[in-house]
Image: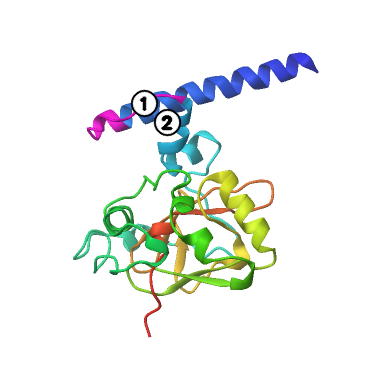
Amino acid sequence: GSRNHREEKLGAERLLRLLMRRVLFAHLALGTTAFSATRAGVLRLAPTAVLGNLMGGSQGAKFPPPVVMGDESLMKPKAHGTSETPVQENLRWACDGRTADRICNFNRHYAEYAGYWESTSFLKDEGPASGEIDFYDSNSGKPLFTAPKDRSWEDFVRESKSHGWPSFRDSEVNWDYVRVLPDGECVSVDGTHLGHNLPDSKGNRYCINLVSVAGNKVE
Protein backbone atom coordinates (compact mmCIF):
# COMPACT_ATOMS: atom_id res chain seq x y z
CA GLY A 1 0.00 0.00 0.00
CA SER A 2 1.60 3.19 1.28
CA ARG A 3 5.05 1.57 1.42
CA ASN A 4 4.88 0.55 -2.24
CA HIS A 5 3.73 4.05 -3.14
CA ARG A 6 6.68 5.59 -1.27
CA GLU A 7 9.09 3.21 -3.02
CA GLU A 8 7.63 4.05 -6.44
CA LYS A 9 7.92 7.77 -5.65
CA LEU A 10 11.54 7.39 -4.56
CA GLY A 11 12.29 5.40 -7.72
CA ALA A 12 10.76 8.14 -9.87
CA GLU A 13 12.78 10.78 -8.02
CA ARG A 14 16.03 8.86 -8.59
CA LEU A 15 15.15 8.45 -12.27
CA LEU A 16 14.53 12.17 -12.64
CA ARG A 17 17.79 13.07 -10.86
CA LEU A 18 19.71 10.72 -13.15
CA LEU A 19 17.99 12.22 -16.18
CA MET A 20 18.81 15.74 -14.99
CA ARG A 21 22.49 14.87 -14.63
CA ARG A 22 22.67 13.22 -18.05
CA VAL A 23 20.93 16.08 -19.83
CA LEU A 24 23.05 18.69 -18.02
CA PHE A 25 26.26 16.89 -19.00
CA ALA A 26 25.06 16.58 -22.60
CA HIS A 27 24.30 20.29 -22.86
CA LEU A 28 27.59 21.25 -21.24
CA ALA A 29 29.37 19.08 -23.78
CA LEU A 30 27.48 20.84 -26.58
CA GLY A 31 28.42 24.24 -25.17
CA THR A 32 24.85 25.20 -24.26
CA THR A 33 25.08 28.07 -21.78
CA ALA A 34 21.43 29.05 -21.43
CA PHE A 35 20.36 25.75 -19.94
CA SER A 36 18.79 25.62 -16.48
CA ALA A 37 18.98 22.22 -14.77
CA THR A 38 15.45 22.35 -13.42
CA ARG A 39 12.79 19.69 -13.77
CA ALA A 40 11.00 21.78 -16.39
CA GLY A 41 14.25 22.41 -18.24
CA VAL A 42 15.12 18.73 -18.28
CA LEU A 43 11.74 17.59 -19.53
CA ARG A 44 11.76 20.38 -22.12
CA LEU A 45 15.21 19.68 -23.53
CA ALA A 46 15.85 15.98 -22.85
CA PRO A 47 16.56 14.03 -26.02
CA THR A 48 13.92 11.41 -26.74
CA ALA A 49 16.67 8.81 -27.01
CA VAL A 50 17.72 9.39 -23.39
CA LEU A 51 14.11 9.38 -22.24
CA GLY A 52 13.53 6.12 -24.05
CA ASN A 53 16.58 4.42 -22.56
CA LEU A 54 15.81 5.53 -19.01
CA MET A 55 12.18 4.51 -19.30
CA GLY A 56 12.87 1.05 -20.58
CA GLY A 57 13.39 1.70 -24.27
CA SER A 58 14.75 -1.21 -26.25
CA GLN A 59 18.35 -1.56 -27.32
CA GLY A 60 18.98 -3.95 -30.19
CA ALA A 61 15.30 -4.86 -30.38
CA LYS A 62 13.44 -6.29 -33.33
CA PHE A 63 9.97 -4.81 -33.27
CA PRO A 64 7.23 -7.12 -34.58
CA PRO A 65 5.01 -6.32 -37.60
CA PRO A 66 3.64 -4.01 -38.79
CA VAL A 67 6.95 -2.29 -37.99
CA VAL A 68 9.43 -2.39 -40.87
CA MET A 69 12.94 -2.56 -39.48
CA GLY A 70 15.92 -0.73 -40.94
CA ASP A 71 19.64 -0.71 -40.30
CA GLU A 72 22.46 1.79 -39.90
CA SER A 73 23.15 1.90 -43.63
CA LEU A 74 20.12 4.19 -44.00
CA MET A 75 21.87 6.85 -41.95
CA LYS A 76 25.32 6.69 -43.49
CA PRO A 77 26.90 10.05 -44.39
CA LYS A 78 25.58 11.55 -47.62
CA ALA A 79 25.87 14.84 -49.46
CA HIS A 80 24.06 16.76 -46.70
CA GLY A 81 24.53 15.02 -43.37
CA THR A 82 22.48 11.83 -43.42
CA SER A 83 20.44 13.06 -46.40
CA GLU A 84 21.22 13.93 -49.98
CA THR A 85 19.52 17.33 -49.72
CA PRO A 86 18.73 20.07 -47.18
CA VAL A 87 15.18 20.43 -45.90
CA GLN A 88 12.68 22.09 -48.18
CA GLU A 89 12.13 25.82 -48.05
CA ASN A 90 8.82 27.09 -46.69
CA LEU A 91 8.07 24.16 -44.43
CA ARG A 92 4.45 23.76 -43.38
CA TRP A 93 3.02 25.18 -40.17
CA ALA A 94 5.74 27.85 -40.02
CA CYS A 95 8.32 25.34 -38.80
CA ASP A 96 11.80 26.79 -38.48
CA GLY A 97 14.00 25.68 -41.37
CA ARG A 98 17.34 25.87 -39.54
CA THR A 99 16.04 23.82 -36.64
CA ALA A 100 14.54 21.33 -39.07
CA ASP A 101 17.76 20.95 -41.05
CA ARG A 102 19.82 20.38 -37.93
CA ILE A 103 17.43 17.78 -36.47
CA CYS A 104 16.68 16.01 -39.75
CA ASN A 105 20.18 15.82 -41.19
CA PHE A 106 22.85 16.34 -38.55
CA ASN A 107 21.41 14.58 -35.54
CA ARG A 108 20.61 11.10 -34.31
CA HIS A 109 19.53 11.58 -30.70
CA TYR A 110 18.21 15.06 -30.00
CA ALA A 111 14.79 16.54 -30.64
CA GLU A 112 12.92 19.80 -30.94
CA TYR A 113 11.99 20.85 -27.42
CA ALA A 114 8.92 19.30 -25.86
CA GLY A 115 5.86 21.31 -26.86
CA TYR A 116 7.58 23.00 -29.83
CA TRP A 117 4.87 21.73 -32.15
CA GLU A 118 2.28 23.70 -30.17
CA SER A 119 4.22 26.92 -30.81
CA THR A 120 3.85 26.47 -34.58
CA SER A 121 0.68 27.21 -36.54
CA PHE A 122 -0.28 23.52 -36.60
CA LEU A 123 -3.14 23.76 -34.10
CA LYS A 124 -4.40 26.93 -35.78
CA ASP A 125 -4.22 25.58 -39.32
CA GLU A 126 -5.55 22.09 -38.59
CA GLY A 127 -8.55 20.76 -36.73
CA PRO A 128 -11.38 18.20 -36.85
CA ALA A 129 -12.41 19.52 -40.27
CA SER A 130 -8.96 18.69 -41.68
CA GLY A 131 -9.77 14.97 -41.62
CA GLU A 132 -6.75 12.72 -42.08
CA ILE A 133 -3.65 14.92 -42.37
CA ASP A 134 -0.67 13.78 -44.42
CA PHE A 135 2.77 14.50 -42.96
CA TYR A 136 5.58 14.65 -45.53
CA ASP A 137 9.33 14.18 -45.14
CA SER A 138 10.86 17.63 -44.69
CA ASN A 139 13.72 16.61 -47.00
CA SER A 140 12.16 14.52 -49.75
CA GLY A 141 8.46 15.35 -49.57
CA LYS A 142 7.51 11.67 -49.35
CA PRO A 143 4.40 10.84 -47.28
CA LEU A 144 5.48 9.40 -43.92
CA PHE A 145 2.45 9.59 -41.61
CA THR A 146 -1.29 10.16 -41.91
CA ALA A 147 -3.24 11.10 -38.80
CA PRO A 148 -5.57 10.84 -37.13
CA LYS A 149 -6.51 7.30 -38.15
CA ASP A 150 -8.64 4.95 -36.06
CA ARG A 151 -9.13 7.73 -33.50
CA SER A 152 -10.45 11.25 -33.28
CA TRP A 153 -8.62 14.52 -33.83
CA GLU A 154 -9.11 15.23 -30.13
CA ASP A 155 -7.46 11.94 -29.14
CA PHE A 156 -4.49 12.60 -31.42
CA VAL A 157 -3.97 16.10 -30.02
CA ARG A 158 -4.48 15.00 -26.42
CA GLU A 159 -1.86 12.25 -26.68
CA SER A 160 0.60 14.50 -28.50
CA LYS A 161 0.23 17.26 -25.91
CA SER A 162 0.65 14.74 -23.11
CA HIS A 163 3.96 13.47 -24.48
CA GLY A 164 5.29 16.75 -25.87
CA TRP A 165 5.68 15.68 -29.51
CA PRO A 166 3.30 14.56 -32.26
CA SER A 167 2.61 10.93 -31.41
CA PHE A 168 1.60 8.44 -34.06
CA ARG A 169 0.34 4.86 -33.84
CA ASP A 170 0.98 1.85 -36.11
CA SER A 171 -1.94 2.46 -38.48
CA GLU A 172 -0.80 6.05 -39.02
CA VAL A 173 2.67 5.13 -40.34
CA ASN A 174 3.44 4.79 -44.06
CA TRP A 175 5.78 1.79 -43.96
CA ASP A 176 6.78 2.34 -47.59
CA TYR A 177 9.03 5.16 -46.41
CA VAL A 178 9.47 4.85 -42.61
CA ARG A 179 11.90 2.51 -40.85
CA VAL A 180 12.66 1.77 -37.21
CA LEU A 181 16.24 0.97 -36.21
CA PRO A 182 17.05 -1.61 -33.51
CA ASP A 183 17.51 1.12 -30.87
CA GLY A 184 14.05 2.53 -31.62
CA GLU A 185 15.19 5.47 -33.75
CA CYS A 186 12.65 6.29 -36.46
CA VAL A 187 14.08 7.39 -39.80
CA SER A 188 12.93 7.77 -43.37
CA VAL A 189 14.30 5.65 -46.18
CA ASP A 190 16.11 8.79 -47.39
CA GLY A 191 18.05 9.25 -44.14
CA THR A 192 15.86 11.81 -42.36
CA HIS A 193 15.93 11.53 -38.56
CA LEU A 194 12.28 11.54 -37.46
CA GLY A 195 12.18 10.65 -33.77
CA HIS A 196 11.89 7.45 -31.72
CA ASN A 197 9.50 4.60 -31.09
CA LEU A 198 8.65 4.71 -27.38
CA PRO A 199 6.07 1.95 -26.83
CA ASP A 200 3.55 2.27 -24.03
CA SER A 201 0.70 0.13 -22.70
CA LYS A 202 -1.27 0.71 -25.91
CA GLY A 203 1.54 -0.47 -28.20
CA ASN A 204 4.05 1.31 -30.40
CA ARG A 205 4.07 5.09 -30.09
CA TYR A 206 6.15 7.01 -32.60
CA CYS A 207 7.32 10.22 -30.96
CA ILE A 208 8.11 12.40 -33.98
CA ASN A 209 9.58 15.87 -34.44
CA LEU A 210 7.12 18.08 -36.30
CA VAL A 211 10.04 19.77 -38.05
CA SER A 212 10.93 16.38 -39.57
CA VAL A 213 7.51 15.83 -41.12
CA ALA A 214 6.55 19.36 -42.14
CA GLY A 215 7.52 18.95 -45.78
CA ASN A 216 5.42 19.76 -48.81
CA LYS A 217 4.16 17.07 -51.11
CA VAL A 218 6.39 16.57 -54.14
CA GLU A 219 4.44 15.78 -57.29
What residue lies at 64% left-to-right and 20% top-to-bottom?
9
Q: Residue at x 53, y 25 (%)?
A: 15
Viewer-closest of 163 and 51: 163
Circles 1, 2 touching at the beta carbon (< 8 Å):
yes
Q: Is residue 87 magenta?
A: no
**Residue at (75%, 13%) from the top-left corner?**
3
Question: Among all residues in the image, which is located at the extreme bottom?
Answer: 219
Picture disc at residue 61: none
Q: Is residue 154 above or below residue 163?
A: below
For label 2, the residue is 41
Which element carries disc 1, helix, strand or loop?
Answer: loop
Tell me, yes or no, whether the highlighted magenta stretch contains residue 34: yes
Residue 7 in which image quadrant: top right
* Kind of residue sitting beneath label 2: Gly
Q: What range is drawn magenta here?
A: 27-38
Q: Position of residue 62 (x, y in %)?
A: 53, 54
For disc 2, the neighbor class at 10 Å (few under 14, some 14 to 19, many from 20) is some
Instruction: Identify the residue position indicated by label 1 in the image.
Output: 36
User: Would you say 46 lies left or right of 16 here?
Assistant: left
**Local crowd at mark 1 within 10 Å, few (<14), some, or many (≥20)?**
some
Asked if one can make out residue 203 in the rendered structure from this viewpoint, the answer is yes
Residue 154 locus on image (x, y percent): 67, 58
Callout 2 secondary element = helix
